[in-house]
Amino acid sequence: MIEVKNLVKRYGDHYAVDHLSFTVEDGRIFGFLGPNGAGKSTTMNIITGYLAATEGQVIIEGHDLSEEPEEARRCVGYLPELPPLYMDMTVLEYLQFCAELKKLPRQEQEEQVGKVISLTHLEDMSRRLIRNLSKGYRQRVGLAQAILGFPKIIILDEPTVGLDPKQVVEIRDLIRHLAKDHTVIISSHILSEIRAVCDHVLIIRKGRLVACDTPDELEEKLSASDRIELVAKASKEKAEQILLGIPGITGHTATELTDDTVRLEVTTVGDLREELFYAFAKAECPLLEMRPQMASLEDVFLDLTDDDDAVATKAAALLNGKADAEAGGKEESQVEAAEDLTGETEEEEEASK
């Protein structure tokens, strides 16, 4: 587990990391997202011990990084964006060198090196000089050194850069395999990559945390509940006439797909899916598709990290507003459940007193 508490990294008057707090739980694959300059690399460099924080606390597997740096670092394997490779070494020599640096027991070094070579599919390249490897294979060597010794926490900065599609799939499978026994943190600008492998996403903007949740929850919370997309078997004129008869519709756009099929994007006050269904059914114009307009992870990221503070603030407010509403709903349900159990409302209880 990693606990980051009130972390600050300041350069003069500029805050690269601004009072950042979050917790990464065991066995999770965390996606760490943010635009260029948001503080991702700075935060990862602090967590891995490469950079000192101005303020705050980082606790790794119970070890305070500032008080027990060696013990904390021993729990972390790190692949930076530019892997620290020695070009005049062979792959095998480099990994043996890394095993020495990590102070792995000598009797275990050969077995550990063999395991990471096998996991990263470097068997055929182990005797080649690193300078003669392609960018994709160099990335694999960097990944191999990160997982060497199988530390509890593995931090990967852009792990699939330079890999071909087949290699990307292999690295995804490896990350999922590692997550069974390790906590994995991935920083990437490839949002489809994060969506494919991560079960939690942490987004920062200007050094501050703006969101931390599962990809599905983030997409659902920022989806527009008042916009509905539908495809109807009707002419454009007929579909628009039907919409005019439904109270609560504040706007729409219509696109003809064929002579008798139209795609509609409808803006509503509240959820009007049931009214839309019955209205089109009554007009004998079947609905072929109907769904709320859903935000993608890319939409979530762009809104929360927009350069315009007003756009980013609005997205964050929508995200937090839905979370607060859900929490409020749960509290209300708990009160109602308690009343059902006792048979008394608050007013009745007060009256009995």
Image (cartoon, rainbow, N blue to C red):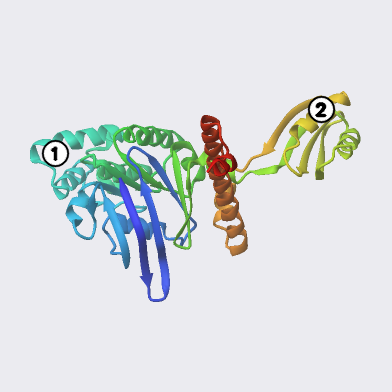
- Measuring from the top left, give residue 29's x and y in whole percent: 39, 40
Pointer 2: residues within 10 angstroms few (<14), some, or many (20+)?
A: few
Q: Quadrant of the N terminus?
A: top left
Discs 2/1, front: 2
- Residue nearest the observer in this picture, 269 or 340: 340
Q: Amino acid at mark 1?
A: Gln
User: How far, Cα to Cα, is label 2 from label 1?
Assistant: 69 Å
Q: What's the residue at 31%, 49% (across, down)?
A: 2
**Rendering quarter of residue 221:** top right
- Measuring from the top left, give residue 63's x and y in whole percent: 22, 51
Q: What's the residue at 42%, 69% (across, down)?
A: 15
Pointer 1: residues within 10 angstroms few (<14), some, or many (20+)?
A: many
Q: Is residue 44 left or right of residue 298?
A: left
Q: Amino acid at mark 2?
A: Tyr
Give the SS element for disc 2: helix
Q: Earlier in the sequence, mark 2 or mark 1?
A: 1
Single out the residue that lies furthest toward the bottom. Answer: 12
Which residue carries the number 2 mark?
278
**Residue 109 got which mark?**
1
Give the SS element for disc 1: helix
- Measuring from the top left, give residue 175's x and y in whole percent: 36, 36
**Residue 182 got which mark?**
none
Query: Is 15 rendered above or below residue 211?
Result: below
Q: Residue 308: tell me if it is visible.
A: no
- Residue nearest the observer in this picture, 88 or 109: 109
- Measuring from the top left, give residue 266's x and y in whole percent: 77, 41
- Residue nearest the observer in this picture, 35 or 269: 269
